[in-house]
Image (tube, helix red, strand yellow):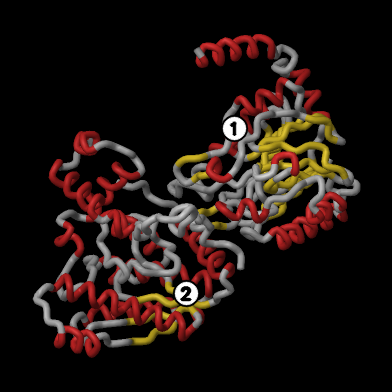
Amino acid sequence: MPPKINAAFVEKVLVAFIRDEFGRCGCAKAVLGLSGGLDSAVSAALAVRALGPAHVLGLIMPYGQACPEDVRDAAAVARKLGLRTKTVDIAPQIDIYFAAHPTTSRVQRGNKMARERMSILYDHSAREGALVLGTSNKTELLIGYGTVYGDMACAINPVGDLYKTQMRELAARLGIPAAVRRKAPTAGLWPGQTDESEIGLPYEELDAILYNIVEGRKTRREVVEAGHAAAAVDRVLRMIRRSGFKRALPPIAKLSIRSVGHDFLYPYDRSK
Amino acid sequence: MKLALAQIVPKLGDVEANVDAHLEVLEKARKEKTELVVFPELGLTGYTLKDLVEEVALDPASDPRLRRIVARTKGLSAVVGFVEESPAEQGLFYNAAAFIADGRILHIHRKVFLPTGGIFEEAKFFAQGRDFRSFRAPFGRVGLLVCRDFLQFGSSYVHHAAGAEMIICISAAPGRGVAGGDAFETARMWELMGEAVSYFSTAFVVYANRAGSEDGVMFAGGSFVFAPGGRLVARAASVEAEIVSCHIDLSAVRKARRAWLFKRDEKPEAVWRSLERIVRASED
């Protein structure tokens, strides 16, 4: 398993990080999607501590009545944190699109919905003069369990270096309601979907394997010898390999002496 | 003697703003009768520069912005981190530390060990320093190091062999590891070295790190002063900006060297001969 984090210290560091990033670009407000799940609740709680509840807008973006309990949980998180919310039902725009371009793939429908939510978030970023806060955790980023240019899109991500199991520790520290902390994690691409059934591994085991590979720099054989099923290790290694494109900017064909993405190299955080 | 660790948050790529911030700290230090102020690595520029290196580089002999800082050191000393480009070596950029005292630059150390690997890419953008040379400061013999120099323990040894009574390391060390106490786990690495070097070189070790974050990397803070014999004199906050002042008694060096004979019994010629043999063998 990844080591237990010192949640109080992590909270302090991440709050400072958010303040630093927002201060640098002269932006006081954050907007993020509140799904009713644990990750967005943690991100929201950190933003509230860094910027104050009045400066955080949580967008609740259900697909019609598909998952009413998630809407309820998102509202409960917002109430607890005291942040502003706005609900945008994405069903009309999704339905119009798929009426014109039908598909039977629920993954395709789910990805389209994730990108619709992204586009609404970025529109509100402009409306509010707010930065979009990311909610993807380290486990998801490593195995690519997210929609590229969908829920993975953000201006800054305070939680991307915390495994799911560590997110739970931080969530407890931040006082996220127990109902949200205990419910089965879901990408919400379709009703009844759960991460663990789709990934095929419980998060405890997935995180343990990832930690061995990433921080432990162990080979496949060493991870198996540490007590993990070979099939599970292979599955995780395959997921990491296949999702590399989601963790990098797209390659730009290099033609000139100095090119964007290759050797025109500037920091993200240059003082304005 | 009163000294201050200026654990500040430099603005990335904004030399003017950072000069102003340095001047403010120096002015306050002068009023408080502080004799030495140590600023972090690349305090005048910020750390994650990449191709900004050439935009923020300055010639210490002529740059008017650095002259303002030099002029503000009347009656005190300061260690300042910046990107050096001298007319003699145009187009070469050094990650440098200047020791300034009483309106004069006494010494410039160019970082020798440029971390490159993992999150670090200094050798991509900086030229490498080639020398560790201690010098006479108003209060004694001083050896300067920049960040990673300090973790390669031969660097401190060279200063020790040359008789340094104080080793000053300026740093922009990122924090890593959050499973420990109320600091990044890597903070331990720096303190361990500080404690050991101050113990076995019977010298003061002054370590000034920075705070704040750049491109998602958090700098760990935790600046410190160890007196000879591994005695912790001061420690700044982890992660957060803080200016920490403390008093040190320079006679502690003499006392430690009377009690522990490491300096007297030092044999640089034996080390040198052995190193020469090792270097020759590796060249064969």
Looking at the figure, which quarter contains the C terminus of chain A?
bottom right
From the viewer's side, name the closer residue of A56 and B101.
B101
Q: Is residue B222 visible?
A: yes
* Residue type (three-letter) at the residue carrying disc 1: Met
Left or right of residue B200, residue A257 in this image:
left
Q: Residue at x 32, y 69 (%)?
A: A149
Chain ID of residue with mark 2: A
Report which quarter residue B201 is drawn in.
Answer: top right
Q: Is residue B227 above or below residue A41?
A: above
Q: Residue at x 81, y 23 (%)?
A: B254
Q: Position of residue B85 (x, y in %)?
A: 70, 45
From the viewer's side, name the closer residue of B98 and B191.
B98
Q: Secondary structure at mark 2?
A: strand
Q: Looking at the image, is mark 2 or mark 1 nearer the viewer? A: 2
What residue is pinned by disc 1? B193
Q: Position of residue A47 (x, y in %)?
A: 47, 71
Left or right of residue B220, residue A188 in this image:
left
What residue is pinned by disc 2? A131
Q: Position of residue B104 (x, y in %)?
A: 86, 43
Q: Residue at x 33, y 39 (%)?
A: A217
Residue sitting at the far left: A104
Q: Position of residue B108 (x, y in %)?
A: 75, 38
Task: Tell how many labels.
Answer: 2
Neighbour tally class for label 2: few under 14, some 14-19, many 20 plus, Cα within 10 Å? many
* Residue type (three-letter) at the residue carrying disc 2: Leu
Q: Secondary structure at mark 1?
A: helix
Point out which mark residue B235 bears: none
Chain ID of residue with mark 1: B
Q: Label 2 to label 1, Cα distance in Å?
A: 41 Å
